[in-house]
């Protein structure tokens, strides 16, 4: 039940101003990128913009290196998401339905890769790759990403399991369905949106990841690595602006969608109660 | 057939548990814990300077190297930056978190929470890039500062050894701003969560007993919100310690821990030294987490 908002004194204007300032600080920088995709200036970041042009969108579209980086990033994110969906759901189901020794440790182990600074995971994988003489490949990137994507799916699915009524499963079994039928007709429809939301968050996380990737990619260039190289040694400023905007949108949309899904299912539950 | 398998499995819950738990656990043990173990082992190897090859023998000399004055300076510099970023984030986050938790109407609150979470989930790299545009010598911030005729102050700040540089985009001050910006949502959310848990009746009681709003804030709200601040500081502190993207993008030749790890393993090929340097932030974080636990931060998460 939502608590009644505090009906004490109104917010002092100083507080309102500070809150507004923090909010603007969080958001204005993102708008700046959208602005800079239109600059005709190739060598500096001059403001005010010396003019307005739309030509960089077309030029960025024709860059083969960008398409290669984008393709690699999408492939990595897709495979890493798939692995996380399978492993994350299995772990969530196990933790939900049984009590076993070390249950807490499972959650802890899964969350560790995002709790420790990314560089620890990165250099740890790098040292393992070096020690075992594994050549850098598509799979070294994917395996690195999956380690920290699993927890996202796990959290989403486990939260859904906990809200699901256990009696549903019992009823299904009582009515004669076997475990597979129960999964197909009762469990899966219940967790489907959680899978979708978790999967999309995992996808966005992987698509944008740079810290672990720098240690596991070798000479391969994912889109974030391409951007990172432009951050340290800017060569194609206007094209980078366009790429930055594109990445912003491609990670933003799945997240918004995932949030909507979670909110919707939470809302539906409120209604049924 | 399926029916028989189903019955077989139904009668053996332990087997089902291991069938489900096995694959994710195996993955995490082999890939993640295995890598962490290899990291630890590597930190006890050393790089032979002449051949450039890693010698796989137990030695403490790589750890001795991490205590070399140049590396010690890196640890100190990074820790100071992480502490400064944490304090600044707490100061900026608190008013917004306080407003969201205690003053915003439910409708506004939903929107504000989304507004705080969006930057958290949107591309980290692109948000750093945005600041490259903003902080550039010819960029929007300099333009704004000139508009206010404050360029003298900016140049004065940039002239300081240690925090200054040729422009905001290439100086520790710039890095500080970007760190504060990037990790800010991680501070707002735990503070807001902690404040939500402060019962309104407590605030009413305080004012009924004659406390002025400021007194209530200082003696009731602030102590109760403090675990939230500590919880947020775990993120801001740990993330700053390990980051190398921001120092590489905006820093100069004065290294930070992450940057040192990155360059030792990359151009230097010295994985043992990189591994030993990584133990620095890990140790600092363990100590930090122990202190945070005593301050009650984990109940606020």
Image: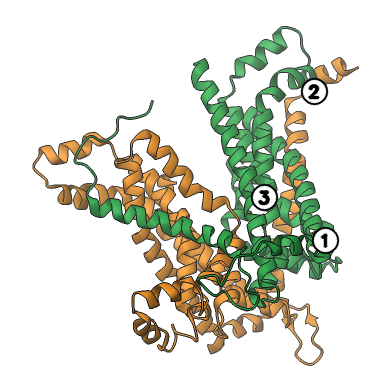
Chain colours: A green, B orange
| Front of the two marks 3 and 2 | 3
Q: Position of residue B197 (x, y in %)?
A: 34, 39
Residue for point 48% across, 78% down = B168
> What residue sits right under mark 3 in the picture?
A250
Q: Element type at marker 1?
A: helix
The answer for which chain carries disc 2 is B
Co-location on one chain, circles 2 and 1: no
> What residue sits right under mark 1 in the picture?
A68
Q: Position of residue A75 (x, y in %)?
A: 81, 51
Q: How many marks are shown on the rendered structure?
A: 3
In which quadrant will I find the N terminus of chain B? Answer: top right
Mark 3–mark 1 CB contact (< 8 Å)? no
> What residue sits right under mark 2 in the picture?
B9
Left or right of B262 on screen, residue B246: left
Q: Position of residue B26 (x, y in %)?
A: 76, 47
Q: Disc 3 to disc 2, how far (Cα)? A: 42 Å
Q: Position of residue A259 (x, y in %)?
A: 57, 38
Front in this rendered view, residue A65 or B175: A65
Front in this rendered view, residue A188 or A36: A36
Q: Element type at marker 3?
A: helix
Neighbour tally class for label 2: few under 14, some 14-19, many 20 plus, Cα within 10 Å: some
Query: Nearer the N terminus, badge 3 or badge 1?
Result: 1
Residue B286 in view in this figure: no
Examine the image and state in which quarter residue B160 appears: bottom left
Q: Disc 2 to disc 1, how far (Cα)? A: 46 Å
Residue A74, compared with residue B13, is above or below; it is: below
């Amino acid at each position: 039940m939502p608590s009644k908002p505090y009906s004490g004194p109104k917010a002092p204007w100083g507080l309102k101003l500070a809150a507004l300032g923090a909010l603007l600080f969080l958001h204005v920088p993102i708008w700046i990128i959208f602005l800079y995709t239109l600059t005709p200036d190739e060598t500096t970041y001059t403001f005010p913009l010396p003019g307005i042009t739309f030509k960089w969108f077309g030029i960025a579209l024709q860059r083969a290196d960008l398409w290669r980086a984008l393709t690699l990033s999408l492939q990595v994110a897709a495979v890493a998401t798939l692995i996380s969906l399978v492993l994350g759901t299995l772990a969530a189901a196990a933790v939900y339905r049984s009590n076993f020794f070390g249950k807490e440790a499972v959650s802890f182990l899964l969350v560790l890769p995002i709790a420790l600074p990314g560089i620890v995971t990165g250099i740890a994988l790098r040292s393992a790759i070096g020690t075992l003489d594994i050549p850098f490949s598509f799979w070294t990137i994917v395996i690195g990403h999956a380690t920290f994507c699993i927890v996202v799916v796990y959290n989403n699915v486990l939260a859904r399991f906990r809200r699901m009524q256990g009696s549903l499963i019992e009823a299904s079994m009582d009515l004669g369905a076997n475990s597979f039928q129960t999964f197909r007709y009762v469990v899966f429809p219940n967790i489907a949106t959680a899978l979708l939301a978790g999967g999309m968050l995992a996808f966005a996380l992987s698509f944008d990841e740079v810290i672990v990737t720098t240690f596991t990619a070798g000479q391969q260039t994912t889109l974030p690595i391409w951007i990172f190289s432009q951050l340290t040694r800017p060569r194609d400023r206007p094209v980078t602006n366009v790429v930055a905007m594109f990445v912003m949108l491609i990670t933003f949309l799945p997240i918004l969608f995932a949030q909507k899904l979670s909110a919707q299912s939470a809302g539906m539950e409120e209604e049924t109660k | 057939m399926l029916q028989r398998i189903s019955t077989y499995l139904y009668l053996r819950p332990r087997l089902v548990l291991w069938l489900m738990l096995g694959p994710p656990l195996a993955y995490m043990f082999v890939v993640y814990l295995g890598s962490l173990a290899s990291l630890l082992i590597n930190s006890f190897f050393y790089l032979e300077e002449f051949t450039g090859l890693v010698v796989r023998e137990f030695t403490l000399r790589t750890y001795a190297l991490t205590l070399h004055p140049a590396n010690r300076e890196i640890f100190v510099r990074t820790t100071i930056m992480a502490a400064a970023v944490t304090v600044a984030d707490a100061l900026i986050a608190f008013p917004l978190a306080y407003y969201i938790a205690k003053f915003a109407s439910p409708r506004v609150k939903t929107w504000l929470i989304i507004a705080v979470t969006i930057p958290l989930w949107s591309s980290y790299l692109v948000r750093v890039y945005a600041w490259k545009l903003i902080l550039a010598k010819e960029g929007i911030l300099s333009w704004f500062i000139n508009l206010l005729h404050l360029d003298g102050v900016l140049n004065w700040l940039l002239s300081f050894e240690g925090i200054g540089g040729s422009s905001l985009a290439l100086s520790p001050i710039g890095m500080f701003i970007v760190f504060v910006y990037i990790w800010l949502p991680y501070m707002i959310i735990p503070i807001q969560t902690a404040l939500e848990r402060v019962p309104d009746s407590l605030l009413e009681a305080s004012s009924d007993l004659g406390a002025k709003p400021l007194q209530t804030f200082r003696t009731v709200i602030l102590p109760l919100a403090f675990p939230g601040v500590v919880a947020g500081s775990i993120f801001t502190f740990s993330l700053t310690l390990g980051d190398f993207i921001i120092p590489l993008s905006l820093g100069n030749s004065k290294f930070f821990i992450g940057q040192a790890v990155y360059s030792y393993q990359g151009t230097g090929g010295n994985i043992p030294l990189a591994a030993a340097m990584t133990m620095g932030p890990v140790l600092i974080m363990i100590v930090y987490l122990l202190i945070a636990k005593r301050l009650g931060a984990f109940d606020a998460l």
